């Protein structure tokens, strides 16, 4: 039986017709075993080519954690992107397809010993840090490595704030850069992260102002920096249209141009912005229930096997398979398949009434879904299919 | 004057039309059907809030969707028209003297009836004895067509993702190929080259899996968002770019000359398919 879906205006802003067409062609062809994640490779190519297009001297390092599926990694490798990693597992992925160490950086300020050991033998030599202990670790494992200090910057307006865990203030950052030099490392730059899914363009203003101050402070101490890593944070469309990448980049480029020497390297580490909206989660409605006056809809993917970010506030958009009849829309509480009461994806989701067994598509789900998934309760981690 | 705002989900622009009169508004089993009158375009047929045809300019679309395929064939006798309940394609096909049989397959009979009543100049051919009306899903009809004796299959459907989806699957394309005669042509619309280039490419690629020859031509349609409208055309061998019979029918826009110039230059077509056209 051919599956059809009623696409509404607000979906159209989130997923292109070509992506949907390809996804549906796939659903027609294959014997479907839900849940799984479809990634439109054309969309990834399109988004990757947008990254850094409007920033001078920009180099792209794909944040592997967003979606470490080997097919995605191979595809990014073909596009000649660099990679940003944090662990031996991610490095193993890259080494399995022969990515050159010069194209790999690690911006995790606190690395494991195992990772450092393997990174050293592979030849990775660009690392973020934000503590003296980390400098000491790096001196021990990769003595001449190039390092960049992580500044703390405001994360207001980003839907997935990060800054509290990492980053230091200006004075401490300067001390750390000097300490790294003293210990024989090569301090080359500064990094920061405005927070993932950052829709507040002003965050980059503050971050770049702060980075500029540190840049000058370093120069006054005889330390010439030459790299600025602006991290990630570009937002994608989940339920509504956000500021476009081009707009953000033009603004960032101007800010950098006004504040920094014009020949420095700009590194960027987008993850979500590359793969997020190329992904469509294909799931199935497995149950419906009415409890008190709440209507519950259960699907076979939930908080533990793919939709972890829903807990942190990411709201997804859904397209329910058309049953051929016009059905009224209702507000649902949407829940995953596990027995845990924490496994509630969202509340008050307006969706047409549907039947158990129907397919439900979850849009913009290419990033931080499978990479967060666990096998809790025996539900296996959904597969990724590149189309 | 009240206004009608079109709700084409994928259009980045919205078209707003003056409404002189609402002549019909009803709901069929499949969609909402509306006929309005506009001072410039005359009567307009609207399905699910998307403009399908207008009295004033319907011929651009109907002529271009029909005559390119039928002139690329030397001697078309049997044709399947799927969708196009308004009858515009059937009217155009009947202009060819060689035609013996048209299977007119429309899933929504209401559209045919509304057109008979409000668009008599468009639906003029639907009751011709050579026309056999089949109210059913076009995909099911083509699947059951056994002999490879159809000279053209013409799709005039609504949205590719919505309930017209069965007409855009690999299974359907295969069934079309198998029912076509050796010189037979398959033609379907594919959105705007301005707004939905990626969709145009995807459909060309999907067709190339099934047909050895796949091409596209364009025409400018004022009332379709993005205007620069693409028609995908495919065959089992002969190039649709060639005109294989003398141009003798009466048309307002199509001609043998238009036929030749409506196809993309080869170089541009290649660049499109390599995704090198950047807009």
Image (cartoon, coloured by chain):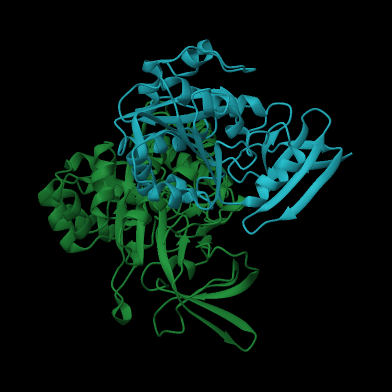
Q: What residue is drawn where x is 27% and y is 56%?
A: A86
- On screen, A22 above or below A322? above
Percent coordinates x, y for residue A251 in the rendering: 54, 35
- On screen, A299 above or below B90? below
Q: Nearer the viewer, residue A321 or A346?
A: A321
Q: What residue is drawn where x is 48% and y is 60%?
A: A160
Q: Is residue A45 left or right of residue A246?
A: left
Q: Nearer the viewer, residue B6 or A208?
A: B6
Chain letter for the cyan colouring in the rendering: B
- On screen, B253 above or below A277? above
Q: Nearer the viewer, residue A174 or A374?
A: A374
Q: What residue is drawn where x is 49% and y is 22%?
A: B68
Q: Is residue B259 left or right of residue A306?
A: right
Percent coordinates x, y for residue A292 in the rendering: 62, 89
Q: What shade has chain A been given?
A: green
Q: Is residue B47 left or right of residue B237?
A: right
């Amino acid at each position: 039986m051919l599956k059809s879906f009623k696409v509404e205006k607000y979906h159209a802003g989130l997923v292109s017709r070509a992506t949907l067409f390809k996804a549906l062609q796939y659903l027609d062809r294959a014997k479907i075993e839900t849940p799984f994640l479809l990634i439109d490779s054309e969309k990834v190519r399109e988004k990757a080519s947008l990254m850094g297009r409007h920033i001078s001297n920009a180099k792209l390092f794909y944040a592997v954690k967003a979606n470490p599926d080997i097919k995605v990694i191979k595809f990014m490798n073909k596009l000649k992107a660099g990679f940003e990693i944090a662990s031996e597992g991610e490095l193993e992925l890259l080494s399995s397809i022969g990515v050159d160490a010069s194209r790999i950086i690690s911006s995790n300020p606190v690395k494991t010993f195992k990772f450092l050991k393997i990174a050293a033998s592979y030849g990775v030599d660009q690392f973020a840090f934000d503590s003296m202990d980390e400098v000491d670790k790096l001196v021990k494992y990769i003595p001449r490595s190039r390092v960049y200090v992580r500044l703390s910057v405001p994360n207001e307006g980003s839907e997935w704030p990060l800054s509290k865990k990492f980053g230091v203030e200006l004075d401490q950052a300067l001390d750390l850069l000097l300490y790294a030099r003293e210990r024989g490392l090569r301090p080359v730059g500064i990094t920061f992260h405005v927070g993932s899914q950052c829709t507040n363009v002003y965050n980059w203003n503050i971050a770049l102002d702060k980075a500029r101050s540190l840049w000058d402070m370093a120069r006054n101490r005889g330390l010439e920096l030459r790299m600025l890593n602006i991290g990630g944070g570009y937002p994608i469309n989940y339920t509504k249209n956000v500021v476009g990448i081009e707009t953000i980049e033009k603004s960032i480029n101007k800010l950098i141009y006004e504040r920094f020497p014009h020949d420095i390297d700009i590194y960027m580490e987008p993850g979500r912005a590359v793969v997020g909206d190329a992904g469509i989660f294909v799931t199935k409605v497995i149950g419906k229930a009415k409890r008190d006056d709440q209507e519950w809809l259960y699907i076979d993917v939930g908080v533990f096997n793919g939709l972890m970010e829903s807990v942190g506030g990411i709201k997804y958009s859904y397209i329910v398979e058309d049953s051929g009849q016009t059905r009224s829309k209702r507000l649902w509480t949407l829940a995953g398949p596990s027995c845990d009461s924490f496994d509630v994806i969202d509340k008050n989701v307006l969706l047409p009434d549907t039947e158990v067994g129907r397919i439900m598509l979850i849009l913009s789900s290419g990033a931080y879904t499978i990479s967060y998934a666990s096998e809790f309760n025996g539900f296996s981690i959904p597969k990724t299919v590149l189309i | 004057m009240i206004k009608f705002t079109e709700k084409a989900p994928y259009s980045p622009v919205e078209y707003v039309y003056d409404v002189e009169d609402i002549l019909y508004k009803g709901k069929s089993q499949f969609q909402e059907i509306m006929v309005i009158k506009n001072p410039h375009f005359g009567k307009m047929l609207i399905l699910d809030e998307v403009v399908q045809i207008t009295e004033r300019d319907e011929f651009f679309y109907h002529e271009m969707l029909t005559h390119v395929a039928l002139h690329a064939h030397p001697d078309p006798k049997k044709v399947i028209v799927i969708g196009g309940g308004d009858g515009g394609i059937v009217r155009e096909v009947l202009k060819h003297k060689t035609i013996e049989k048209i299977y007119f397959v429309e899933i929504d009979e209401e559209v045919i009836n509304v057109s008979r009543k409000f668009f008599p100049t468009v639906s003029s051919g639907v009751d011709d004895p050579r026309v056999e009306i089949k109210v059913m899903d076009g995909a099911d009809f083509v699947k059951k067509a056994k002999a490879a004796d159809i000279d053209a299959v013409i799709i005039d459907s609504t949205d590719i993702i919505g309930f017209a989806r069965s007409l855009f699957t690999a299974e359907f394309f295969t069934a079309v190929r198998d029912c076509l005669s050796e010189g037979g042509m398959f033609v379907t619309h594919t959105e705007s080259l301005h707004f939905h280039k990626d969709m145009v490419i995807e459909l060309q690629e999907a067709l190339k899996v099934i047909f050895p020859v796949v091409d596209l031509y364009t025409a400018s349609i004022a009332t379709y968002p993005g205007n620069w409208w693409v028609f995908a055309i495919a065959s089992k061998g002969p190039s649709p770019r060639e005109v294989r019979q003398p141009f003798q029918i009466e048309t307002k826009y199509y001609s043998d000359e238009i036929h030749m110039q409506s196809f993309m230059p080869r170089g541009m077509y290649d660049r499109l398919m390599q995704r090198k056209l950047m807009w």
